Amino acid sequence: MSKNRKRHNKSKNPLVRSSLTYAQALEATGQARRNLFTVIEYPKPDFDIGTHTQNKLASIVEMMDGIGKSSGDFPKEKFDQAITFHKLPIEAIEWLEKAGIPARRTSPLSTLAYRDLFASEKYFPIEKEIIEKFFSHFIHCLLVETQIIIAKQYYQGLGLHQPKKPSILEAFPNIAPQFKAELKEAEEMGMDLLTIEVDQLHGRIFLEYCTVMIRAQWDKLVSLSCLMFGLRQNWGSISDGLKALDQHINTSDKLDPGCKHYSKIFLDIANERLSEKAWLKGFRDSLLHQVGQHSLGVAPQRTSSFTTSELWDKMCDEHNWLREAIMVILLAFVFKGSKTENKN
């Protein structure tokens, strides 16, 4: 093939352009996902969960693991980080990795080890009465994690983290003359209305989605924990669910000490991240129930003190804490279901 022919083909491929418009980026993403992935892990009969549940688990794990690996995708390593552990000791992290859960990998939840750990009588089985419900709940958690990772991929892949400050008069050149005069007058009075950070506005779509889903994931984890410990899930708020878990952990004489230990770490993280003064609660609740906290550069309010990019970093920190909490509660479940010969 001639050099001219190669150059011509390269220019026609939207995936190799150095910069794309939003429409081109979405089109390129669509092209990269035309081929459906094939799950190569087949259901096995020696597990206490049915074929349908095994297929769902394998599908969502394959989907999560495949993010950033298809042609034209934005690589996962460029937008996501491995967990920075704050509470979980190194020996616990190493145990998880030996058990098949890649706790220090970029996608730590992308593994079929859950099936091997919790659905095999050889290891740490869930009670048969609740095992299908357990995996149904947990698969939903994995799906939410997958959606969060995809949203993070779009945000970083579209270059929205770097703030840009074009003049609103440049962004909207056809503004009527009388409105231009009003904007200039507002600027002279100290009101910053002549700049609009369009990328920061677009970034809010992904920021708000991820924040809401992270908060929803906490509800799912607490609900899953209540299911595991045989507690009623009719609590009106997540704080009530956490209190019920705390009371059960502290008063039950039948729980393994390891289960109690890791459950308390989980509760410590959950109570800290979901407290009234924590960033997650204030930001998420204002989105759903109040006016919402605008970003600097995006119709800012008096209380606006962060750009979307800075808020994004806060959201990523919450995602980090959430994933550590998932690792912790999995360890608690392991100790709860552990047989005597498997304690070590």
Image: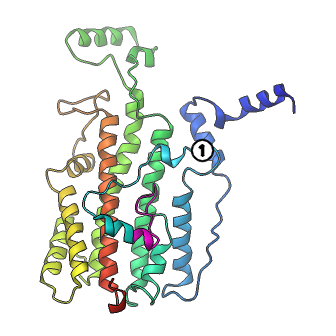
Residue 321 locus on image (x, y percent):
29, 56
Which quadrant does the C terminus fall into?
A: bottom left
Q: How is the image coloured?
A: rainbow
**Left or right of residue 74: residue 4:** right
62 or 240: nearer the viewer: 62
Give me the residue at 19% from left, 11% from top. 189
State yes or no: residue 6 in magenta.
no
**Left or right of residue 327: residue 70:** right
Residue under numbered circle 1: 29
Residue 281 locus on image (x, y percent):
21, 52
Q: Is residue 259 above or below residue 314?
A: below
Residue 246 locus on image (x, y percent):
16, 74
Residue 183 figure quarter: top left
Which quadrant does the N terminus fall into?
A: top right
Range of residues picked out in magenta:
96-109
118 or 199: nearer the viewer: 118
Which kind of residue does numbered mark 1 sit on? Thr
Q: Residue furthest right?
A: 1
Give me the residue at 16% from left, 56% from top. 275
Q: Is residue 118 above or below residue 339?
A: above
**Left or right of residue 1: residue 220:** left
7 or 197: nearer the viewer: 7
